Image (cartoon, coloured by chain):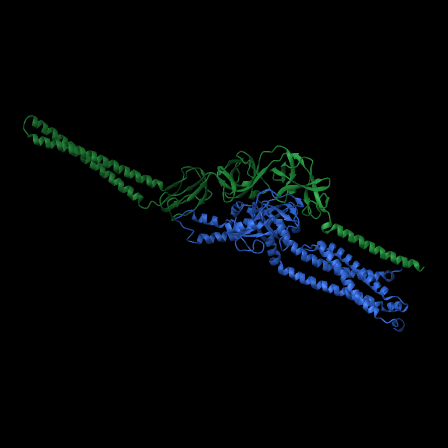
Amino acid sequence: MKRLPFQGRSMAFAAVLVALVALFAYVALRSGPLAPIAVTVATVQSRSVTPGVFGIGTVESRHRYRVGPTVAGRVKRLMVDVGDQVVAGQLMGEMDPVDLDERVRALDAAYRRSEATVREAELRREFAQTQAERYEQLLAVRSTSQEIVASKQQERQVADAALVATHAELARAGDDRAALVAQRKNIRLVAPADGLVIARDVDPGTTVVAGQSVVEIVDPSSLWVSVRFDQSSTLGLESGLPTQILLRSRRGEPLPGRVTRVEPRADAVTEETIAKVVFNSILDPLPPIGELAEVTVSLLATAPAPVIPNAAVQRVDGQSGVWMLVRGDLQFTPVTLGASDLDGNVQVRRGLSVGDRVVVYSAKALRARSRITVVDRIPGAAP
Amino acid sequence: MISLAGRDIQHDWGKYVFTGIGLGLLIGVTLTMAGVYRGMVDDGKALLDNSGAELWVVQKETLGPYAEPSSLNDDAYRSILAVQGVSQAANVTYLTMQVRSAERDVRAMVVGIASGEAGTPGWPSYLVAGRQITRSHYEAVADVAAGFALGDRVRIRRHHYTVVGLTRRMVSSGGDPMVFIPLKDAQEAQFLKDNDAVLQSRRRTSENPAFNRASVPGLLDAVITSQSRNPYVNAVLVRLQPGYASDDVAGSIERWQRLTVYTRPEMEGILIGKLIATSAKQIGMFLVILAVVSAAIVAFIIYTMTLGKIREIAVLKLIGTRNRTIASMIMQQALGLGLIGFAVGKIAASFWAPFFPKYVLLVPSDTIAGFFAVVVICMLASLIAIRAALRVDPADAIGG
């Protein structure tokens, strides 16, 4: 009776101690540096990838007309407003002619005066002609002197010359007037093409300088997206490639399009290549010009090659490579990467072959001597 | 030979074990506090490790990019690449801000990483789920501590980003989770304010007669465009070619590019010596007090435990037990208590450490040092108790 409870006590104490030791061993091996690192593993497969290029751009119009006067002046009237459709040749507004009309009238009067002068010169010449002829006949019957006939002939020549001068004067007056009328026409603001008014920069009464835009017109059928692509990813970008355009206002509704031009000149400051992407069909309603768009260009699919997820690529001692699983041990293998797609798959040019097993995710940074345990998913990482 | 200590413990093992567990929890707190301190330092080092850089090129005469604001032109990296010994140079921006997802916001350090492939300086060095960023805009890789899941859409300033990858232990020196986004977006996020502010700034510019001149059409547009660009980054991260000493390359960049360059030891000095110095000292001070208090409590427990048995010890002495036997009994009990306490403390600390909001790093060397400290403290405490026990008069066994 006396021994049993004593033994029971020591058993209980021993049990507590054993539990404690076991827990301690578990903690020491499962946490801290001795704990194995959870990793996930993927098998290298051979397949082709479809590289993509992603960029953002703004909706722009290919044809954009800024209409304004060619000389400084004041805007007299404007008949169109933003949103109006105009046709080529339509009068949209007019600059204040100031004294142009009066000057045209003055030139009209000057022209008529020149006409009168011509008439006068003609009359003078006719009279000089008649006089010269008459004295020539008198000279033939010897009833006048040689000298007088010579003087009459000279008068006729002078009248001839005067007539030529007045004709020239008349032509000058006419041209002057025509020039002024052309100037008068020039201050009319006429639509150069069919389009949509997108800006009316000033209102009637405002003084504008030569070349300043008064009304801006775009051609709605020529909308395109001017996209900026990061230069490091533009290998293979060329005109004609299909694209997906995601307008900021139509999220979840990608629109088909295609690259129409890759600009020969890139932006050296922002390190971007610029391309123009057109919509496959005209949009209705039109997206506002300047709206932001995300553009994804699908490049041509590459030939099959070993493919790994880009999460597997790590950098150790200055070399890009992957942690390969060789008979349960980690081994760092430097690789040369090739084409990659936007879903994170990257082809390996050198360093891996199909069937190799590589570490994709790890719970900690790996070293060659790390203890690992292969799991399906890293614990704690939400899927 | 019978173990007096064992017999005594078995006599009242429940009390003994519970004393040990109580002591253990106290030791656990001390170990955790050491872990908190180590975690702080490790957060700082993790920040440096994660950047993957060997040199940090920052604005001249600043302690940037972590300890002070620093900004340099985003094309500075091109001339740095030309310096002999540099193998990779990449722009990077850091901005600590609130990142919003659908229903909550998280304080995070937004890191703008240069385009390129995995392994570019500044990129997250490993992932736990998802993939690295492949698009040059509007994708993000977040630290798991931020609590985002793959596919979540988070808002940084005015743009939405899709979380495509998750990483772990990518934190700022303050322990905030990092969110990696493409550099161009980060530059914009750092500089561009909300739409109202943009509008206000445009209005202000257009009201300035120097910029809004009718005689120079297009000037206002040009000025506004130049105002809403941000050609700056916070630092350039540099990796060296093999065989070049970081001090040499740093010296040559400092001399010819007129910028300030930090090497890894210098950066550690800045982070640990300046950025987290006060809070680390605070924790360190607390740790010292906690250790002293724990030692005192261990000593008191063992002392009172011995005094509680003083009558039994007197009896032992009366029946002629040798002093050595009594002393070793007390010493064994004290050590046993210390071992139980250490084990419980280590277990407790390991179990509750992951639940701390900031990183708690339990370093094995700390644990080993803690073990020896516990043993030494127990031995010292038992010496006092032994002294008290040996001085007891055997007559007390009958007298008291």
Q: Quadrant of the N terminus of chain A?
A: bottom right
Q: Pick out the residue farthest to the bottom.
A: B399
According to the rendering, which colour does chain A have?
Answer: green
Q: Camera-side residue: A227 or B327?
A: B327
Q: Pick out the residue farthest to the left.
A: A143
Q: Is residue A265 visible?
A: yes
Horizontal side of B237 relative to B289 (left or right) equals left
Q: Residue at x 30, y 39 (%)?
A: A179
Q: At which x and y percent is residue A110?
A: 24, 40
Vertical comparison of A250 with B8: above or below? above
Q: Quadrant of the C terminus of chain A?
A: top right
Tell me where residue B35 sits by quadrant: bottom right
Horizontal side of A263 relative to A42 (left or right) equals left
Q: Camera-side residue: B333 or A303?
A: B333
Q: At which x and y percent is residue B329?
A: 84, 63
Tell me where residue A49 sits by quadrant: top right
According to the rendering, which colour does chain B have?
Answer: blue
Q: Pick out the residue farthest to the right.
A: A1
Q: At which x and y percent is residue A35?
A: 73, 49
Horizontal side of B98 relative to A116 (left or right) equals right
Q: Is residue B235 visible?
A: no
Q: Camera-side residue: B219 or A303?
A: A303
Q: Pick out the residue farthest to the top.
A: A140
Q: Residue at x 17, y 32 (%)?
A: A160
Q: Camera-side residue: A261 or A48?
A: A48
Q: At which x and y percent is residue B167?
A: 65, 47
Q: Disc count in the image?
A: 0
